[in-house]
Amino acid sequence: MIIELDMQSDIPIYTQLTNQIIEGIASGSLKPGEALPSVRSLASDIGINLHTVNKAYQLLKQEDYIHIHRQKGVVVNPNGMPEANQEFSDKQSAQIRPLIAEAILRGVSLTEMKEMLERIYREIEPPVNKADHKKE
């Protein structure tokens, strides 16, 4: 998986890193149980502060995307991701609301929003699931 960070972005680097790792897991680029680079190694490879990588890893650990073991290092959750529950749904709604409000203010229609969401969803979803959607 290639990590691309925009150092000029308003989005904090640790957030960009967290989002890209989550997308890597969602797309199947990172598999359950797969090892991730150590904090020091990743920081060195992409040229950022190790505390930034550590913050991203800690957030991913809190959300159960990764496990951090003393012997095994950092690995993608080998048990896969937990199912969506009400808490997850509430968190997602809270994150999406401002995006929808901004889209409304800028004249983006509901149809355009749906099309954008579907396009992004299909770009990220793993190839196995893409075949399932063709049946729909």
Image (cartoon, rainbow, N blue to C red):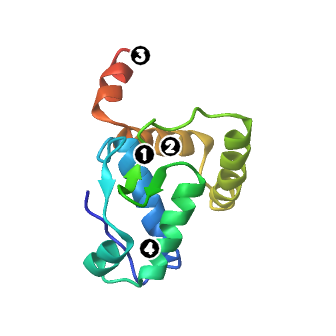
Q: Residues within 10 Å of mark 2 (few under 14, many from 20)?
A: few
**Tag in front: 3 or 4:** 4
Rendered location of residue 132, percent (x, y)? 35, 20
The residues tagged by marks 2 and 1 sit, at their Cα atoms, a distance apart of 5 Å
Disc nearer the start of the sequence (3/4): 4
Rendered location of residue 109, percent (x, y)? 60, 46
Q: Amino acid at mark 2?
A: Leu
The residues tagged by marks 4 and 1 sit, at their Cα atoms, a distance apart of 26 Å
- Which type of secondary structure does the marked residue at label 3 adopt? loop
Rendered location of residue 18, percent (x, y)? 47, 62
Q: Residue at x 42, y 81 (%)?
A: 50
- Which type of secondary structure does the marked residue at label 4 adopt? helix
- Name the one closer to the observer, 28 or 7: 28
Disc 2: which residue: 117
Query: Answer yes or no: do the residues labelled 3 and 4 have beta carbons within 8 Å?
Result: no
Q: Amino acid at mark 3?
A: Glu
Q: Residue at x 38, y 72 (%)?
A: 39
Residue 87: tell me if it is visible: yes
Quarter of the image where the N terminus is located: bottom left
Disc nearer the start of the sequence (1/3): 1
Residue 136: numbered disc: 3
**Which quadrant of the view contains residue 103?**
bottom right
**Tag in front: 2 or 4:** 4
Query: Answer yes or no: do the residues labelled 3 and 2 have beta carbons within 8 Å?
Result: no
Q: Amino acid at mark 4?
A: Val
Disc 1: which residue: 120
- Count of numbered labels shown in the rendering: 4
Disc nearer the start of the sequence (2/4): 4
Q: Residue at x 70, y 49 (%)?
A: 91
